[in-house]
Image: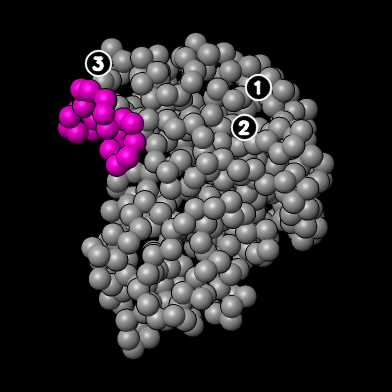
Amino acid sequence: MRCFIEVYGCQMNVHDAEILSGILGSAGHQITKDPEDAEAVFVVTCAVREHAETRAMGRITHLAGMAGCGSKPLVAVCGCVAQEHGERLLEKVDVIDLVVGPDAYHRIPELMTEGVRTAEVDQCSEEYEDVTPVRTQFPRAFVNVMRGCDNYCTYCIVPYVRGRERSRSASDIISEVRKLAAGGFREVTLLGQNVNSYSSGDTGFPELLEMVSDAAGSDCWVRFVTSNPRDLTPGLAEVMASRENICNQFHLPAQSGSDSVLKAMNRGYTRNGYMKKVAMLRELMPDIVMSTDIIAGFPGESPGDFQDTVSLLEEVRFDYAFLFRYSERKGTGALKLKPPVPVKERLSRLSVLQELQREITIERSKELLGREMTVLVTGPARVKGQTAARTRGNRMVILEGTGYEPGEVFSVRITGADGYTHFGMPVIPPVR
């Protein structure tokens, strides 16, 4: 069958789609980039926020109706929404044929041949070690180091749809990184719902990061996401600061600047503790690029609590922030918390945070004007005639022209900056 895969949500979902492509290819199916040419469509979904789930379900209905192959394609819902709703999706949406959770992708080729509408959402410790992912992001690659989460933050559905924490063996991770580096990949990103809690035998995440740095070699950059602040240790920060190929970027979700809200969220740290870790990172790596996640309008968040979050953004001055209004998720502890913040107020608070962070991001961005920075070419930019690249801090840099190859690394001078996009000119043309 010709199969089309569409992805929503996090980088873990992007990599899951690469794993799914590998499984389908091994079973003799062909991956197509054209949904109208597809005999089967797979939508890898995200359940973290209601909006993402709604968008994905609307897209599923649209894809099912395209029928470019002459008849309705087989429609499979994969990922976290599949795990969350299971068989109920088959009852609610008649165009769906298969519902498959993140631990059951191996069964998809078999389910496709059975011709029966079914849901497969049993959870297990599947790591897909026997699957060769179809890498779609060259020269950048994702490497899972762990799956699941044991934190049970009260707003979050991830432990319920991704299961409990389980870490891959360090030897399997190192082997994968070595192969990627040998294959010409110039950047690897270690993935996990909470990479800082990685544990395999005597190996914790700081030790793993050192090992990955060695395996990647000097020509391959290393990143990781995502970290819970309570698990960030001085040892991890020291490893980052001591290794040239580990990128100076850290995504550290704060979620709120209020101690009472953080406690209600079950985050396991205080505002003061969070600020100390930010200070530790910046002391060791003064040029570090920092980003965060913030939720506006969590149940019980008072106007004073919200101002604490505003002041957190003002004090830390993140380079980037991913800002969301609180979204109810069935089965999570936050549904029991009172009083709920009206949706209109959540949106109003979100707007305040967005405007503040937009100003900070632009100011931080413009500080780079005139600086020389090393970039990795990632491929064509969205605008024809331009090329996209990334700095070690993961900032987007646009280069005029198309005479660059993905994977090239060289210095540029930043000539323009609008906050989220930067423009650069090579200081010395890359040697080919």
Can the viewer see residue 414? no
Residue 253 location in percent, x, y? 48, 29
- Residue 233 is marked as 1
Find disc 3 in the rendering and name its residue.
Answer: 303
Q: Position of residue 33 (x, y in %)?
A: 48, 73
Seen in the image, is 414 located left or right of residue 77?
Answer: right
The residue singled out by tag 2 in the image is 196
Q: Residues within 10 Å of mark 2 (few under 14, many from 20)?
A: many
Mark 1 touches mark 2? (CB < 8 Å): yes
In the drawing, does residue 149 fall left or right of residue 63? right
Give SS at disc 3: helix
Seen in the image, is 385 located left or right of residue 403? Answer: left
- Closest to the camera, between mark 2 and mark 3, is 2
Q: Residue at x 56, y 56 (%)?
A: 15
Neighbour class for label 1 at 10 Å: few (<14), some, many (≥20)?
some
114 versus 131 height, above or below: below
Asked if residue 210 can be seen in this view, the reply is yes
Range shown magenta? 325-349
* Mark closer to the chain start, 1 or 2: 2
Q: Earlier in the sequence, mark 1 or mark 3?
A: 1
Q: Is residue 337 magenta?
A: yes
Q: Amino acid at mark 3?
A: Pro
**Mark 2 or mark 3: which comes first in sequence?**
2
